[in-house]
Each structure stands twice: as C-alpha cells, then as structure tokens.
Image (tube, rainbow, N blue to C red):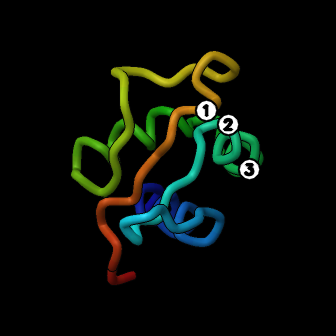
Amino acid sequence: MEMEEMVWIIRDMGSKDKEGRTVISFGRLFDRYVKISDKVVGILLRCRKHKMLDFEGEMLWKGQDDDVIITLVLQELAF
C-alpha cells in the first residue's frame, strides 16, 4: 500500500521530462511526503527494488540529495 501511495504522489506532484516520463526531485518529494510518513527513503528504496521507480545512488539523504531526480518507471498502476 505504501509503495502504491508513493507512485500516486509522484504522479500527482511530478512533471514530465523530454521523454514523457514523470519525474520529481527528491527534495520536493521529501518535503511533501515526510508529512505523511517518516519512512520516505525506505519506501523509495522498496519501490526501486520492485522496478516502480528509479534514481541514482544507493541511498538518498535530505539536503545532500535534494536535486536527485526520481523517475517513475511504472506509469500505470492498478489500485
């Protein structure tokens, strides 16, 4: 459920890149999602493991990685 909610939030808050993929910066997502759950990084890592989204690096840190772009891989998700 948390992973599906994360995908929904990224789809809702993100923007389209040149290839039509939905993207959002980690800083923007963190600032919004931390109000919902303090487990934002763990959820992002699980989503990437399940090939729902992608981003560079092994871990994301608030402040240091605010400009890292998170790309939604799974464009359509049945809820």
Residue found at x 33% / y 42%: 46
Residue found at x 47% / y 56%: 2
> Mark 1 belongs to which amino acid?
Asp
Which x, y percent locates residue 28? 70, 45
Q: Is mark 2 on a helix, strand or loop?
A: helix
Q: Mark 3 points at which residue?
A: 32
Give whichever of discs 3 and 2 has the lower sequence position: 2
Residue found at x 50% / y 41%: 69
Q: In which quarter of the image is the C terminus?
A: bottom left
> Mark 2 belongs to which amino acid?
Gly
- Please name which of the two marks, 3 or 1, marks the residue nearer to the observer: 1
Q: Name the residue under label 2.
A: 27
**From the viewer's perspective, is 5 left or right of 38?**
left
Give whichever of discs 3 and 1 has the lower sequence position: 3
Q: Name the residue under label 1.
A: 67
Q: Which mark is residue 20?
A: none
Crowdedness of circle 3 by 10 Å Cα count: few (<14), some, many (20+)?
A: some
Q: Do the residues labelled 1 and 2 touch (CB within 8 Å)?
A: yes
Which x, y percent locates residue 17? 48, 62
Crowdedness of circle 2 by 10 Å Cα count: few (<14), some, many (20+)?
A: some
Q: What element carries label 1?
A: loop
For the residues labelled 3 and 1, the Cα–Cα distance comes to: 15 Å
**From the viewer's perspective, is 47 left or right of 61?**
left
For the residues labelled 1 and 2, the Cα–Cα distance comes to: 6 Å
For the residues labelled 3 and 2, the Cα–Cα distance comes to: 9 Å
Residue 15 position by quadrant = bottom right
**Residue 19 against residue 61 in the figure, above or below:** below
